[in-house]
Amino acid sequence: MLRHSLTALMLGLILLAVLPAQAQQFEQVGDYQIHYSAVNTSFLPASVAREHGIQRSQAMALLNVSVMERLEDGSTRTVIASVDGRSATLDGSDESPLAFRSLRIDDTPSQVAVFRIREDEPMRFDLRVRYDRNAEPAEVSFIQRFYIDR
């Protein structure tokens, strides 16, 4: 249990430390916040990547999506969501589906997808996030540019 808590803390700190100011990107949909961030997998410690089956590579990135619900008392809680989506160049060429899988560290669920980076070229991400089975999925789109550190 302590090892998982330390892993969760380390992964969270790494993602906060290595992501630019856009790390806290989210879309507000009613009482829900859909948080998303993408980072080069080479920033992950080898032990964290190995434990969660994430390939570390200068040419690969990790997209992490989690959903928070705002409660009546003003606090928030993480909710389980499913995500599907795709990435493409800005002109729509080179479109690739993203293969999301659930990742749970302690009681915090998120969806992650690993994908190949297109160096120094903006990539567009189009996601459909289902956080409530009784509601239509929310659509989230964003653009991010990645660099390969050689």
Image (spheres, rainbow, N blue to C red):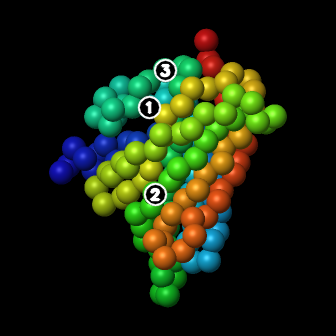
Circle nearer the viewer, 2 or 1? 2
Most foreground residue, 37 or 8: 37
Residue 59 against residue 34 in the figure, above or below: above
- Where is residue 51? Give x, y as percent: 28, 34
- Where is residue 65? Give x, y as percent: 51, 52
Rendered residue at 69%/28% (across/down) = 94
- Look at the image and tell me whether residue 9 can be seen: no
For badge 3, the amino acid type reads Ser
Residue 128 quadrant: bottom right
Number of the label disc, if any, that sits on residue 27: none
Sequence-first disc among 2 and 1: 1
For badge 2, the amino acid type reads Ser
Mark 2, residue position: 82
Q: CA distance from mark 2 to mark 3?
A: 26 Å
Q: Tell me the crowding category of disc 3: few under 14, some 14 to 19, or many 20 or more residues within 10 angstroms, Cα based.
A: some
Mark 3, residue position: 57
Rendered residue at 37%/49% (across/down) = 102
Residue 141 against residue 54 in the figure, above or below: below
Mark 1, residue position: 44
Most foreground residue, 90 or 74: 90
Residue 72 against residue 124 in the figure, above or below: below
